[in-house]
Image (cartoon, helix red, strand yellow):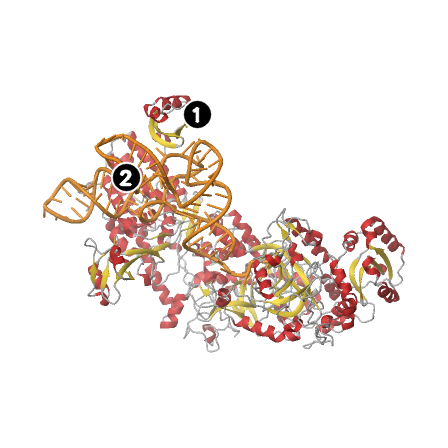
Amino acid sequence: MGYDFDRIEKKWQKYWSEHKTFKADINHDKPKFYVLDMFPYPSGAGLHVGHPLGYIASDIYSRFKRHQGFNVLHPMGYDAYGLPAEQYAIQTGTHPEITTEKNILRYREQLDKIGFSFDWDREVRTSDPEYYRWTQWTFIRLFHSWYNKKTDKAEDISALITHFEINGNAGLEATNTCEEIFTAEFWNNASEKEQQQILMHYRLAYLSETMVNWCPELGTVLANDEVKEGLSERGGHPVEKKLMMQWSLRITAYAQRLLDGLETVDWSEPIKEMQRNWIGRSEGASVDFEVWDGDESPKVLPFGEDLGGVIEGTGNTEDSNNENDPENTPGYYGTDKGAWFANKDYVRELRKNPTDAEALLWENVRKDRIGYRIRRQHAIEAYIVDFVCLSKKTIIELDGDIHDYQAKADKLRTETLEENGYSIIRFKNSDVNDHLEEVIKTIKTYLDNKIVEDLKVLLFGEDLGGVKEGTKTTEERYKGDELITPPHPSPKGREQIIDYNLNESTKVLPFGEDLGGVNEAEVKTTDKGDSFTPPLPIAIWDSPEGREQITDKNLNESTKVLPLGEDIGGVNKPNQQTQKITVFTTRPDTLFGATFMVLAPEHELVSQITSASRREKVEAYVSWAKNRSERERMTEVKNISGEFTGAYGVNPLTGGKLPIWIADYVLSGYGTGAIMAVPGHDSRDFAFARHFDLPIIQVVVKEGEEPTDPATWDDSIDSKEGVMVNSGFITGMKVKEAIITTINKIQEMGIGYGTINFRLHDAIFSRQRYWGEPFPIYYKDGMPYTLDESGLPLKLPQVESYLPTEQGDPPLAALTDWKTKEGYPLETNTMPGFAGSSGYYLRYMDPQNKEEYFSAEANQYWRNVDLYVGGDEHAAGHLIYSRFWNKFLYDLGMACEAEPFKKLINQGKIQGRSSFVYRIPGTNKFVSHNLRKDYDTQRLHVDIDLVENDVLNTKGFKAWREEYKNAEFILEEGKYICGWEVEKMSKSKHNVQNPDALIEKYGADTLRLYEMFLGPLEQDKPWDTNGIEGVFRFLKRLWRLYFDNNDQLIVTNENATKEELKVLHKTIKKIHEDIERFSFNTGVSAFMICVNELMELNCHKREILEPLALLIEPYAPHVAEELWQSLGHTGSISTVDFPQYVEKYLAEASFQYPVSFNGKMRFKLDLPMGLTIAEIEKAALESDEAKKWMEGKPVRKVIIVPNRIINIVI
RNA sequence: GCUCGAGUGGUGGAAUUGGUAGACACGUUGGACUUAAAAUCCAAUGACCAUUGCGGUCGUGCGGGUUCAAGUCCCGCCUCGAGUACCA
């Protein structure tokens, strides 16, 4: 009979099941160990050999830990919601639950056959109402939570409401999408619905209209990680971007913690790296660029350039190319042609020679440095003055030589300003440069002594000329549906001032200056100070997901969050007096190299800034871009496209005018959807600039090199490291220093701030599907409310059809009674696949608990997963979502560990090994692999079950398919040899290896050993059945150490020899080490070596074989149990102490030294242990072999590593 | 493009800290047992040269380097795989 695996395995599987051998209960006397497999989606195809690979590894580890005295939690369950069952339901009408149940039974049957030590009493299924009630429960908690950045954790929404009641949303640091600042008064007077709308911007589970991945084929929205290369992960269907009302989880609130947590877990570096990439943290700056308020202004003035000659940047646009056309050319700044011509030379001059004096002075007087608040480049009446102290009505002007010929104009200006109560003090540039301290002293003294009669302080937006522009526009803003359109192309009062002023002086701003005190914070203060309460609906602005601000001001994003059924209703964005474009850049140091700007076609400002003459083209481009599928956009990345809007931005540091383009290489979903283009140092910007003939400036050089002419470049210049050139106040600095300096500068200027941007988006949480968890949400007055927790679970109802309704709503929408008791409609979307899998490891700790998710006691005991095994396909999805889920529950005080999975092992994929036959086309003749070159053949996949060791079973092949019934074969040496190749395992390639067939032939223990023997666990490897015989042979040999050919136990009680003990303990040591480091393949080798050596020693001694049975139990549990019982033990072997390695048995009397000459091994020398180095050297040099190799040459050096090597250098 | 990983016999792979490259297994070849087959056991098996015997040369993707000594460390490439992709 011999090794009868079939009998043994069935016997022990039954025993384990009946005795609940692997049931784990809280036991405070034992240390816990939690081993978890990523639970499977039970597909209709059942398991193939790739699936159990990780389960076998984790099972070995679990069993090993039990032998070491740990209380091991090793559960298994099913991720039962999934698209395939629902697709099947749509096709056949079979309820997905039935399909799923059937598949689970099949999975269970297959799993049982492999002999896993799961505690099946803890099985969970995500589709079980008793399970998903806790998924729903968590969702309710998320809905009622917000993220407090001050405490850096999620908190109950009630605390937020209290804050609103007392302070409005001022002084709050919360992750949110609420753009508006509101007062307590406003909050307290708001209706419930209005309050709910506001709260929606703070909830961790929220409803919003966002750009989603819509898959028409699947009829549902998908999360980012469910889309691969523009196609759905399941099914490979095209995905498009669509604006839809969706539930999302505010996972972005946790971005930094998710990133930081990676440092505390023991995961493979590639997976951590993938998560880091997915979270995508980049440090940089948010910078505001004002929009140049003038139509059709063609001048591009990057730093250092002048206006002469060819008009740059718009070479491809006809209407700006003709300077001689009086209709076109002078229209630069809107209305006043004369002013432009009068000033243009002056402007050119100024741009060529920016003064440093102003910057220098500013450095010394800015903020309150001299005891007075000084502002610079401030708009006073129609003029921009260099510096002003508003409280003292004092203007400080700097005049270089350059100004001198402007004396007349300045005189006029002086008069105008003085009429308004201002006094002006003037300094020469040279005064500032040479006698700075004196200048400052003079200013201070002047201010100290000046008495201002009217102490009215001019707030920004006010001027002295009567009309309070800023306030007016604020009122207009909320007047109603209609905006009052001013006659001037620029709709905003403040910009008119700037505009006028530019006409007047067209001043080039020195470095570090801005165009006139645009200061967001002050504007807001003004609004608040007026205690002006805008009528509702207020505009609430959604920031792009993933955007994280260091400072809590500024949120100027595009997507509106609106409750269902609500419309935007003509609300206009507040604070638009200044049209500005905010960009995110990781390289603020290259600001001086920015020569144009690009907006995403979807950017909200596009329609507002586009000039009349460009409108048609721009609109055509926007609609073209909108109608492209994601996939098209991605595959056509190399094609450069874009359109000039006709508008210009102002470089805040150089004052240079940057043409604003739209192009789809700028993504609306990242950063602010707008960029400053630095073609000199960004390859995409470079390509774009070349394509549209836009200027390129070099601002970084490698240290020690000289700048070169960008016209000669083939690509942008790498600028990660180097020294700044052409960059004003940062010229000469190294990149790192320049970044910091620039951020400080723009922060001072109030036009930006250092910030961190995350690529991570909030997780879109609704699916327009039937087969998923229903949301515990109902709608009242169009706003979502959560069901009472006592009403959970909200069970998934039966439906007639699994298809969307005719209106395109989810299947649940077809139900007329999908309502609460009170008659409120319930949410008709369902939750996505990752909902149920995000917290299942916690439920396993206490799976039967009817009162709560899991008890505190269970959580305190089991804590988190010590070893998590699964595929790396979940790196960006499940592993992020469940970490988020856990951190949220951690914030609630429920989960006691901040990270759910301490150690993660990713098993590699098992690829298929396809076999091929070679047919002569048009015939039914098949040529053996090595003869195929002599024929013209076509390669066809053949079922791997018909092939053994690459030899085709020709009879089987003929029977395989009707068309091959009369196949003829051209054989080599009497055999038909098949070709082979490693491919993905798939039905169509006929290379799927089903474990059941192997278990039937060789048994589960062989399968377990062989899957491990195949290669390193974490590596991808092809499945090849050829080697399985060797493992099977090994088990049969093992058996024969214990039994003779007549099945008689031949184990003796004789004392083991030194040799035998050495073999055993060598193996104990090796197995122990290999399991600890998850090197299961070398473990199997060690067993083989052990058995081979014991065979050779003809050892049948209990002293050796009893520990050996224990040792192999984790790998081959069935045979181990059987041997253990045969040796006279009762009960399971599974918790018996693991054999201990005893070092003394490995002690050797001698060591065989490899002796090398100049590093090349030449011969071996057996020397006793314990010799001194000198003795070893002497013995080595005096040996006959050594003399032969030395050939009488002198020995230069001898290296001896005791018990390792002898190397003789000659 | 970027990030990560990997390249070792005919095949899967081993070499854990720089110290005998190719453990273990498959396959192949030869042999034993058998009427025969299966099963089992024994031997050989990196390539090349030599072979009467002793033996020798080369060899871990390629090219350099460090070292007494490199599959292992460093520099520069090549190829394959995975992830990600106009992410500013």
For disc 1, the chain is: A
Q: Amino acid at mark 2?
A: Val
Q: Position of residue A311 (x, y in %)?
A: 67, 67
Residue marked by disc 2: A1091
Residue A138 pos. (x, y %) = 51, 60
Picture residue at 41% right of the left edge, 74% below the top: A801
Q: Position of residue A520 (x, y in %)?
A: 71, 62
Q: Nearer the viewer, mark 1 or mark 2?
A: 1
Subunit ID for the residue under disc 2: A
- Can you tell which quarter of the image residue A684 is in? bottom right
Q: Quadrant of residue A650?
A: bottom right
Residue A1016's tag is none
Query: Could you tell me which quadrant the C terminus of chain A lies in?
Result: top left
| Disc 2 packing (10 Å; few <14; some 14–19; many ≥20) | many
Q: CA distance from mark 1 to mark 2?
A: 45 Å
Q: Is residue A366 left or right of residue A811?
A: right
Task: Name the residue tied to disc 1.
Answer: A1196
- Nearest the viewer among A1182 and A1036 is A1182
Give x and y (percent) for residue A727.
Answer: 68, 54
Classify mark 2: helix, strand or loop: helix
Is residue A1139 in view?
Answer: no
Q: Quadrant of residue A659?
A: bottom right
Judge by depth and name the residue closer to the eye, A532 or A1022: A1022
Q: Write the residue at 70% across / 56% down.
A: A746
Residue A703 visible in the shown view: yes
Q: Earlier in the sequence, mark 1 or mark 2?
A: 2
Residue pictured at 81% horizontal, 67% vertical: A381
Which amino acid type is marked by label 1? Arg
